[in-house]
Image (cartoon, helix red, strand yellow):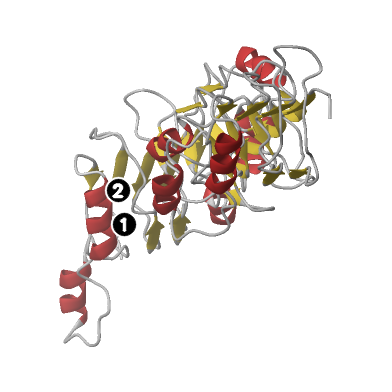
Amino acid sequence: MQACLVIEKSTFSSLQCPYLERIVPCEPGRAVFEIIENVNLLTFSIPSTVVFPEGEKVVIVTGNPLLPQGTITKLKTICPFCDIKYDYSKCRMVETFGSVEELVERCAGQPVIIGEPGFTLQYNLTEKLLERLFSEAVEVKMCLVVKATLITNLVFPKLTKWTSCAQDKPALTIVNNPFLGRLQFPMCTNQECISGVVIEGNPLLSITELNQIKSWCINCNLQPYVPACGLGNGPFTVQQFVQACAGQQIIKQPQGFEVTIQSTEVTEEEMNSFCSQAIFIEACIVITNSQYQSLRCPYLQEVRPCKLGQPAITIVDNAQLQTLEFPELVKFEEVESMIVVKNNPLIPPSEIAFLRNLCPLCDIQHSNSQCKEMTVVGSVEELVEMCQGAPV
């Protein structure tokens, strides 16, 4: 065969020429076979007895992470002076793993990371783990979902090609990350770099950065963050703000606004719906002298006040309030004014202790009524003496 075959960055999985006896390049100095950076190539085979012009580098094989070492060894035996490299990835055809840490341990530092069809990475992601995993990755085939995290920077320093795990899924989904301020692909050069990206609900990602990312992807869905849960820069009422943000993960007041949500303006049901899915809240919540029985923010990761020096959450003098629900990992700034909780006699001591542990410097007090769960008293005078001034 006299020819020059170039198979580069293809979807080929196999190339076999079992009956070749002699090969000659199409012109002097060229290789007959140039097999370069084919992430799906599993097999390349030519007979060990093939004859070619002396001194010609007839075979170039490099950057094919799925070719086994046996194939590379055989090719080097056929042509010892040819440019033939073993680029086998330790992180190929990933199917399952016990934890993200195990996956990172296996795949960190690999230039090619390939998952089985449908393979998606999306839980328990941290900035350090993702940095380790993708620091050397040149080509990736999987779906990555970064959603509702505390990640601030996401950079893929060497990436040149990212293929989705499935035709109907984006390769990258970056959604509702309140502190993500940098998302970069410095080695991407064209729109074929990433096969599908969804970005929305990331308040710190600039329009400039989103436009840059648009240059690197096919089938992009890039939505800039709109403050106040889509209401924009106003004007709007507190009720409209609470309704718009119900069930949202990122709740952030517009720049220059100070949003205070009072229990006198919204019902307990509305307040809990507002908090139900939130991972980040920038606003002030004030529940005082109310009939509320609970405030539940089960997924909250960080809360910031509407105004510097003002409490983010004030819960005072609520005779029927029994439950305050926050996750263990919620982050409060350690200043005295961040949370104020006092004179709520039905909140159990255990919940007060839990809140104090979350924010040791905050003004959080247990107000136990001396006049509850009574059985019998000797006289009206004794009852008055016991219960005078008690809120419950």
Image vertical order of residue 284 relative to residue 271, above or below = above
Secondary structure category for the residue under label 1 = loop
Is the N terminus in the top left, top right, bottom left or bottom right quadrant? top right
Tell me the CA gap for discs 2 and 1: 8 Å
Q: Percent x, y for residue 116?
A: 64, 53
Q: Which residue is rendered at x = 72% and y = 25% of the image?
A: 217
Looking at the image, residue 392 sits to the left or right of residue 2; the answer is: left
Mark seen at residue 367? none
Mark 1, Cα crowd under 10 Å, few <14 / some 14-19 / many 20+, is many
Q: Quadrant of residue 361?
A: top left
Looking at the image, residue 335 sits to the left or right of residue 15; the answer is: left
The residue tagged 1 is 344
Q: Is residue 218 visible?
A: yes
Q: Which residue is rendered at x = 78% and y = 23% of the image?
A: 24
Q: Nearer the viewer, residue 352 or 72?
A: 72
Q: Amino acid at mark 1?
A: Asn
Q: Quadrant of residue 57?
A: top right
Q: Amino acid at mark 2?
A: Val
Q: Percent x, y for residue 298?
A: 46, 55
Nearer to us: label 2 or label 1: 2
- Mark 2 near mark 1, Cβ–Cβ under 8 Å? yes
Q: Percent x, y for residue 26?
A: 81, 17
Q: Which residue is rendered at x = 26% and y = 56% of the image?
A: 354
Q: Which residue is rendered at x = 55% and y = 48% of the image?
A: 70
The residue tagged 2 is 341
Is the C terminus in the top left, top right, bottom left or bottom right quadrant? bottom left
Looking at the image, residue 218 sits to the left or right of residue 119; the answer is: right
Secondary structure category for the residue under label 2 = strand
Mark 2, Cα crowd under 10 Å, few <14 / some 14-19 / many 20+, is many
Q: Nearer the viewer, residue 38 or 109?
A: 38
Image vertical order of residue 294 relative to residue 275, above or below = below
Q: Percent x, y for residue 61?
A: 63, 30
